[in-house]
Image (tube, rainbow, N blue to C red):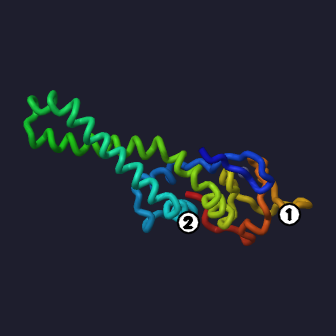
C-alpha cells in the first residue's frame, strides 16, 4: 500500500471526499461533474475504478447464480429472477467500488495532491491555502493539518470555485 507524503517527506493523509463529491463520483460522469478538483481527480482514477467495479460486478453475478438463484427463482419466476440477478450484481459492484475507492485514491496520491495544489487547496486535507507565509525552505504550512507544500506547486491567485 502506498503511503502519502508531503513536500517535507512527512506522512500525511489524502483529502476526504465530501458527500457531494462522492455523489459525483458515484454518478461517474466526469463531463458533468461540477467542481474542477473532483473532475480532474476522476480522470486520474477512473480506469482503476472501472476495473474494480467490473470485478465486483462479476463476483456479484457469480455469487447470485451460485447461491441465491436456486432459492429466488422458484418464488418469482425466471424473468424477475434475472432482473434481481442484474441488480444484485450492480449493488455488489458499487459496494466493492466504494470499499476500494480510498485505496485507489491513495495509489494515485501524488497526482491527486498535484490537482488539489494546482487549484489552491491542501493536498492532504483539502483546506484552502490562502495568504500564507512561505517558510525558509520554500514550503507553505497548511493551518488545518500542518502538511508542508512547496509554494510554487500551489495556485497563486484566489480560487473562485470552492470544492462543492
Ligand atoms: Zn491540510
Residue 2's place in the image compared with 63, above or below, is below
What percent of the width, then of the height, locates residue 45?
50, 58
**Mark 1 lies on residue:** 138
Location of residue 80 by image quarter: top left
Instruction: Judge left or right: residue 155 versus residue 23.
Output: right
Instruction: Judge left or right: residue 131 versus residue 114.
Output: right
Numbered tag placed on residue 36 in the rendering: 2
What percent of the width, then of the height, locates residue 88?
27, 40
Residue 53's place in the image compared with 149, above or below, is above
Q: Secondary structure at mark 2?
A: helix
Residue lying farthest to the top in this orientation: 71
Near mark 2 (Cα within 10 A), the count class, few <14, some 14-19 or many ≥20, is some
Disc 2 to disc 1: CB gap under 8 Å: no
Is the C-beta of the residue carrying label 2 under 8 Å from the nearest atom of ligand 1?
Answer: no
- In this view, the residue in front, 53 or 136, is 53
- In this view, the residue in front, 82 or 30, is 82
Residue at the image position 45 percent from the left and 64 percent from the top: 30
Amino acid at each position: 500500500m502506498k503511503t502519502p507524503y508531503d513536500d517535507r517527506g512527512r506522512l500525511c493523509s489524502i483529502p476526504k471526499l465530501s458527500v457531494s463529491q462522492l455523489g459525483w463520483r458515484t454518478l461517474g460522469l466526469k463531463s458533468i461533474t461540477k467542481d474542477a478538483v473532483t473532475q480532474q481527480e476522476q480522470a486520474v482514477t477512473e480506469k482503476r475504478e472501472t476495473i474494480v467495479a467490473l470485478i465486483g460486478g462479476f463476483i456479484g453475478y457469480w455469487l447470485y447464480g451460485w447461491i441465491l438463484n436456486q432459492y429466488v427463482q422458484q418464488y418469482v419466476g425466471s424473468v424477475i429472477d434475472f432482473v434481481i440477478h442484474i441488480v444484485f450484481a450492480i449493488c455488489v459492484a458499487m459496494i466493492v467500488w466504494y470499499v476500494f475507492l480510498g485505496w485507489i485514491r491513495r495509489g494515485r496520491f501524488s497526482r491527486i495532491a498535484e490537482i488539489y495544489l494546482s487549484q489552491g487547496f491542501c493536498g492532504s486535507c483539502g483546506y484552502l491555502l490562502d495568504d500564507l507565509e512561505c517558510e525558509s525552505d520554500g514550503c507553505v504550512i497548511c493551518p488545518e493539518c500542518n502538511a508542508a507544500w512547496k509554494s510554487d506547486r500551489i495556485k497563486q491567485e484566489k480560487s473562485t470555485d470552492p470544492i462543492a
